[in-house]
Amino acid sequence: MAVRYCRRRREAFPALGVYKKLLIRGNRFAGVVLVGDASDSNRYMDWLRNDADLLLRRRNLLFPEPEKDRGASVAEVADSETVCGCMGVTKGAIIGAIHEKGIPTLAQLKECTRASTGCGSCTGVCEQILKAVAPDFEEETKKILYKCVPFPQENLREIIRSQKLKSVQQVLDIYGNGTGCEVCKPALSYLVDVVWCGDHEEDRSAHFINDRVHANIQNDGTFSVVPRIRGGVTSPSELRRIADVAEKYHVRMVKITGSQRIDLLGVEKSDLPKIWADLGMPSGQAYTKGVRMVKTCVGTEFCRFGVQDAIATGIELERQLENLYTPHKTKMAVTGCPRNCSEATVKDIGLVGQEGSWQVVVGGAAGKNVRKADLLITVKTNEEAIEAAMLFFQYYRENANYLERTYDFVERIGIEKIRKETVYAMREQKRDLLRRLRKAKALSRDAWLEREAPAHPTQFVQIQPMESTIQ
């Protein structure tokens, strides 16, 4: 049994973006596909585990009845069931923490249990448990950055700007607890960076391990190295260098990624500077909250359907924005026609080629939740399309919360307001956004090509795990 928002209902749900498909065999639940809305996943998993007879529930298979008892959905979940899959936190552990610690807010629940600090898909369930269990439940209005610095991020931006605070430690000394933690310091580092467009005092202790060694740590303690391959276009000489490096340093796996790049996996920490030197290629920034890539199709260069030059436009867009930090990772794509081979409509920023124009779309997602990007503007030329993408990019950098992806940001702010303050803004406002972006770009650096001496003697020392003494 499947429901699609077909033509006769499209007017009622023009942008809902939801697809649900259920498989029923002999009044028994056999499977489900949920796209765009996974809020009923617990209900379906419960049916699957218990081999429930659905004969009397057929009216409400896809959409449950309005609950008379709002706590019923929480009560139906067993205490032993995992609520937060990312952190492995059960319903029982959450209830226990609420009682033992007297937790009234979602922020405190996250701090105590780590639930809802991963992908965030369990946030609604965690809030429902809080409402059902916590006697002093408090609905959060403005979310503070963290207890170390008890101010909302929008207030901190103005504090940093107005008082000319150019280091994380200055903010912590004046408005925080003086020391900070692994949660607040990376966020403060980003805020200081974006307010001053890169003209600030860098603090290595405020960065995650990936940013300190400019590579992505893996589950076995080794690292992955991803060179920048702009627009997915490489050359025989680059491929030879990558192959030579992979053989020389005994790289365990060489993988073509879904982003049209090449990933060298299983690299020892101590080999990282030598690999960068031998590659002689820019960093792909696969390890940081920043610009990842611009995926392209071949466009008019080779494709018989292409109506716009996707390759040249994508490479130029990547050159304009690479090495810049963002609130969360930022993925982009340029497609040379509406067939969308580079999947631009599910990227943070996408350029879709039309006959004689470009559509610029923003806020797409293709992860646990799928979201089609919103149309920002339609323009005639490549230059206008790149400028529109840059305006949104800088607006996102300056206004999003740290660790907020573009798709959450667009939904929170609203595409109408974003258009009004970017592509439809007065010329002076647009000029100021682009000026700040270009200043940050001018001060950015490539961690691989502009190598410096290790900031700390152990920066690239591989720490071996201690052997167990238990026989």
Image (tube, helix red, strand yellow):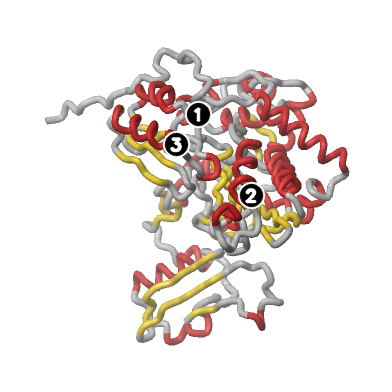
Asked if the residues shown at circle 3 and circle 1 are in contact, with their CB atoms under 8 angstroms apart, the answer is: no
* Mark 2, residue position: 349
Q: Quadrant of the C terminus?
A: top left
Q: Dot 2 lies on which element?
A: strand
Disc 1 secondary structure class: helix
The kind of residue on which mark 1 rests is Asp
Compute the Cα span from label 2 to label 1: 23 Å
Q: Which residue is mark 1?
A: 211
Task: Please name whichever residue, 325 or 173, is drawn nearer the observer in this view of the structure.
Answer: 325
Residue 14 appears in the picture as rendered:
yes
Three-letter amino acid code of the residue under disc 2: Ile
Q: Is residue 407 above or below residue 321?
A: below
- Compared with residue 463, is residue 348 higher up or lower down, i.e. above or below? below
Residue drawn at the location 61% of the way across and 51% of the way down: 310
Spatial CA span between label 3 and label 1: 14 Å
Front label number (3 vs 1): 3
Secondary structure at numbered mark 3: loop
Q: Earlier in the sequence, mark 2 or mark 1?
A: 1
Locate residue 205 relative to residue 27 in the image: left or right: right
Q: Which residue is mark 3?
A: 226
Percent position of residue 367, x then y: 50, 55
Q: Position of residue 62 (x, y in %)?
A: 52, 76
